Amino acid sequence: MSSATAIALGAVLAVVFLVLIGVMLFQEIRTRSSSDPAEFIIDDAVEWVWSQFDGGQKSRLTPDGVRSIIEWQVFGLQQSVKGKPLGSASVVMGATDESVGYILTKVNSFEPEDVRAVLAGQFGYLESIGAVAGIVEGNET
């Protein structure tokens, strides 16, 4: 084999190798963005909800108050499915009468409309991270 042939063969192999790497990177980038699960991070939720509030809500609540409401709501949801077989429990997110009532029994220093505002903001946060698709209209069974 002449040196020119060896160089040409080496160049072809290098190009094939680089094309394979490019295809693998393209597939990894494409699948990574769509298959990463949505992560609910309480600190991020508190920050997002707080940034959505107007001056009146910010005068009645603090970021710690928003955190407390979100944490009690998450705890309540966890308790509502505790002991149930996987896939058999139904979880309803948002400012339902039940969730607002539950939170107010745990922390009575908030007004019901402020709890509703935080839970509505939390729902907006969940939409923003792709964890939920939107509000369901009507009574689904």
Image: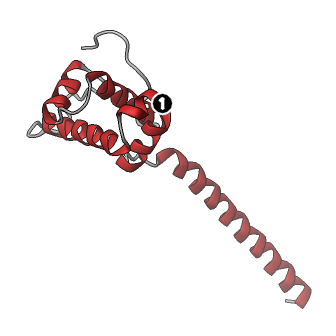
- Say which of 83 and 21 sits in front: 83
Three-letter code, disc 1: Gly
How packed mark 1 is, by other alpha carbons closer than 10 Å (few <14, some 14-19, many 20 or more), is few
Question: Residue lying furthest top in this view?
Answer: 138
- Answer above or below: position of 31 versus 131: below
**What residue is shown at x 24% (from left), y 14% (from top)?**
141
- Placement of 2 over or under 114, stated as above or below: below
Figure quadrant of the N terminus: bottom right
Q: How many marks?
A: 1
Query: Does residue 64 appear in this view?
Result: yes
Of 16 and 1, nearer the camera is 16
- Tag 1 secondary structure: helix
> Taking 79 as reference, is 134 left or right?
right
Residue 88 in view in this figure: no
- Would residue 18 appear left or right of 95 to someone viewing this image? right
Query: Picture coordinates of residue 13 (x, y %)?
Result: 75, 74
- In the image, 36 versus 72, the foreground residue is 72
At 26% from the left and 23% from the top, the residue drawn is 112
Q: Residue at x 17, y 24 (%)?
A: 101
Question: What is the quadrant of residue 98 in the picture?
Answer: top left
Residue at mark 1: 55
Residue 17 vs 32, above or below: the answer is: below
Residue 24, x across and y down, in percent: 61, 60
